[in-house]
Image (spheres, helix red, strand yellow):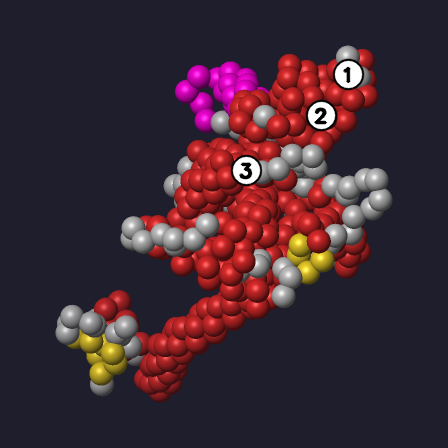
C-alpha cells in the first residue's frame, strides 16, 4: 500500500510522485499565468481546499476499507474454522456411537471403553504389520483380550461406507444445483440411477437367487448399467449440439430425462411381467441393499472412487464458483464454463452411482444437505463444500444407525425409507420458512 508524504505519494518502490491538487489540475488545463476575473481568486482558493480535503478523505477511506476488509476476512475464517471443528466433533461422536451398536446382541450396545480398546488394538495391529511386526495372537486370543475386537471390525466398515456415501451424495447435490442454477436439482437427472436399477435387474434375471452372494458380479452389472447410460446420454447430447460445439446443459438435461424415463419404464415392465415373486424379492433386496453385505472389496472401491472424485472438486473449489455466472457474464469476462459444467456433472454422476450401489436409493441426502450447508456455511462453494462433507456424513450415518436400532418383526427397514422419514420434515421446514439460501 502506498505511504503518504507531505505533498506527495511514495509507492512501495520508493518512487515519489507529486500529489495532484485542484491547482495543479487548473494549471495543466489553463496554464499558470491564466488570468482570473475579479472575485474568482477567492473561489479558486475555496475549491482548492475542498479538492484537497476530498482527496485526503478518499485516501483515508480507502485505507480504512482495506483494514476493515482484512478484519472481516479474518473473522470469517475464524467462524468457518469454528463450524468445521464443531461439525467434526459431532461426526466423531456419532461415529463412535455407531461403533457401539451391536446388532448381534439383539440390538444391544457395547461399552465405549471397550470400543476404544478394540480400535487401539486394530491400529496397533495395522501399523505392526506395516513395519513387519504383526501381533503374534490368534483371532480367539484377540477376542479374549479385546472383547469388542470382532464387532468393531464389522461395524467400522459399515459406518465408514455410510459416511463416505453421505459425503458423495451431498457434494454431488451441490454440484448439480450450481450447474443447473436450481436449488431443487437432483443428481438423478441424467438417468444414471435408473441405469443402475436396470443393470441390477439383468443381473438378477441371469443369476437368479445366487445373485445375493455374488458381490463382484453385482458391482460389474451395477456400474456397467450406469456407465452405459451415461455414455449414451453424453453421446446423444454431443450429436444434438453438433460437431465442434460445446455441450449444452439444457440439452444434457433433456436427454438425461428421456433416458431416465426409458430405463424406468423398462424396469417396471419387466418386474411386472417377467419376474416371479421370489425373484422380485431378490431384486428389491439388492437394489435397496438390504439383503447383501458390503465386503472389503466394495469398501476399497468406494474409498478409491471417493478420493478420485472429491480431490479434483476440492482443488477446483474456487473455480467452481464461476459456473454460477450466466453464459453471457462468463463470456464477457473471458471465461469458458461449459467444460467445467460438464466435468462437475460427470463427477457428480460418478459420486451418486457409487453411493447408490453401496447404500441404495437415498437421493434425498443430495437434495437436503446442500440447503443446510448453504444456510450454515454460506453460498460460496469453497465454504459450502466443507458443510457438504461434514453434514452429509453425519446425516447418512445417523440414518444408517436408525435402521439398525429400530428393527420391525418379520421385516427390515430400508435405508431409503429412513432417509425419507428423517429428511422430509427438514424439507417441509425449508420450504415453509423460505430458507432457500440460494443467491
The answer to whether mark 1 and mark 2 are in CB contact below 8 A is yes
CA gap between label 1 and label 2 equals: 9 Å
Which label is found at residue 275? 1
Q: List x then y, in percent, for residue 309.
A: 46, 40
Under circle 1, the secondary element is loop
The answer to whether mark 3 and mark 1 are in CB contact below 8 A is no
- The residue under the point 70% across, 37% down is 290
- The residue under the point 42% across, 37% down is 336
> In this rendering, which labeled residue sits more in front, label 3 or label 1?
3
CA gap between label 3 and label 2 equals: 19 Å
Q: Which residues are magenta?
A: 225-246
Quick check: 237 above or below 286? Answer: above
Q: In this orientation, does residue 65 appear?
A: no
Work out whether residue 380 or residue 113 is closer to the camera in this orientation and state it: 113
Question: Residue tagged by mark 3?
Answer: 295
Which label is found at residue 283? 2
Q: Quadrant of residue 187?
A: top right
Q: In the rendered structure, which disc, 1 or 2, sits on the residue that comes first in sequence?
A: 1
Quick check: 345 above or below 38? Answer: above
Amino acid at each position: 500500500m502506498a505511504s503518504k508524504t507531505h505533498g506527495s505519494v511514495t509507492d512501495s518502490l520508493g518512487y515519489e510522485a507529486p500529489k495532484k491538487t485542484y491547482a495543479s489540475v487548473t494549471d495543466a488545463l489553463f496554464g499558470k499565468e491564466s488570468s482570473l476575473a475579479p472575485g474568482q481568486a477567492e473561489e479558486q482558493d475555496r475549491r482548492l481546499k475542498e479538492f484537497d480535503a476530498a482527496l485526503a478523505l478518499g485516501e483515508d477511506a480507502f485505507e480504512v476499507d482495506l483494514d476493515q476488509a482484512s478484519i472481516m476476512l479474518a473473522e470469517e475464517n475464524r467462524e468457518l474454522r469454528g463450524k468445521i471443528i464443531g461439525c467434526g466433533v459431532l461426526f466423531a461422536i456419532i461415529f463412535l456411537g455407531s461403533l457401539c451398536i451391536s446388532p448381534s446382541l439383539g440390538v444391544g450396545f457395547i461399552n465405549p471403553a471397550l470400543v476404544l480398546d478394540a480400535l487401539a488394538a486394530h491400529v496397533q495391529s495395522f501399523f505392526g504389520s506395516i513395519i513387519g511386526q504383526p501381533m503374534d495372537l490368534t483371532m480367539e486370543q484377540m477376542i479374549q483380550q479385546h472383547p469388542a475386537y470382532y464387532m468393531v471390525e464389522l461395524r467400522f466398515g459399515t459406518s465408514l461406507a455410510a459416511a463416505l456415501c453421505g459425503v458423495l451424495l451431498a457434494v454431488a447435490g451441490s454440484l448439480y444445483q450450481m450447474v443447473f442454477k436450481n436449488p431443487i436439482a437432483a443428481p438423478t437427472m441424467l438417468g444414471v440411477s435408473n441405469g443402475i436399477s436396470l443393470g441390477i435387474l439383468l443381473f438378477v434375471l441371469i443369476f437368479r437367487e445366487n445373485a445375493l452372494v455374488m458381490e463382484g458380479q453385482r458391482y460389474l452389472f451395477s456400474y456397467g448399467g450406469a456407465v452405459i447410460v451415461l455414455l449414451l446420454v453424453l453421446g446423444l447430447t454431443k450429436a444434438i449440439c453438433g460437431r465442434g460445439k460445446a455441450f449444452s446443459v439444457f440439452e444434457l438435461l433433456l436427454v438425461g430425462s428421456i433416458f431416465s424415463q426409458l430405463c424406468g419404464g423398462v424396469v417396471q415392465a419387466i418386474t411386472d411381467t417377467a419376474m416371479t415373486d421370489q425373484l422380485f424379492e431378490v431384486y428389491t433386496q439388492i437394489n435397496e441393499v438390504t439383503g447383501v453385505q458390503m465386503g472389503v472389496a466394495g469398501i476399497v472401491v468406494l474409498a478409491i472412487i471417493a478420493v478420485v472424485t472429491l480431490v479434483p472438486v476440492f482443488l477446483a473449489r474456487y473455480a467452481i464458483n464461476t459456473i454460477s455466472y450466466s453464459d453471457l457474464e462468463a463470456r464477457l469476462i473471458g471465461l469458458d464454463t461449459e467444460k467445467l459444467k460438464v466435468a462437475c456433472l460427470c463427477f457428480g454422476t460418478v459420486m451418486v452411482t457409487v453411493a447408490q450401489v453401496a447404500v441404495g436409493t437415498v437421493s434425498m441426502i443430495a437434495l437436503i444437505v446442500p440447503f443446510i450447508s448453504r444456510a450454515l456455511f454460506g453460498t460460496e462453494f469453497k465454504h459450502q463444500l466443507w458443510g457438504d462433507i461434514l453434514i452429509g456424513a453425519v446425516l447418512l450415518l445417523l440414518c444408517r444407525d436408525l435402521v439398525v436400532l429400530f428393527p420391525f418383526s418379520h421385516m427390515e427397514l430400508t435405508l431409503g425409507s429412513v432417509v425419507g422419514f428423517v429428511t422430509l420434515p427438514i424439507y417441509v421446514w425449508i420450504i415453509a420458512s423460505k430458507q432457500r439460501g440460494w443467491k
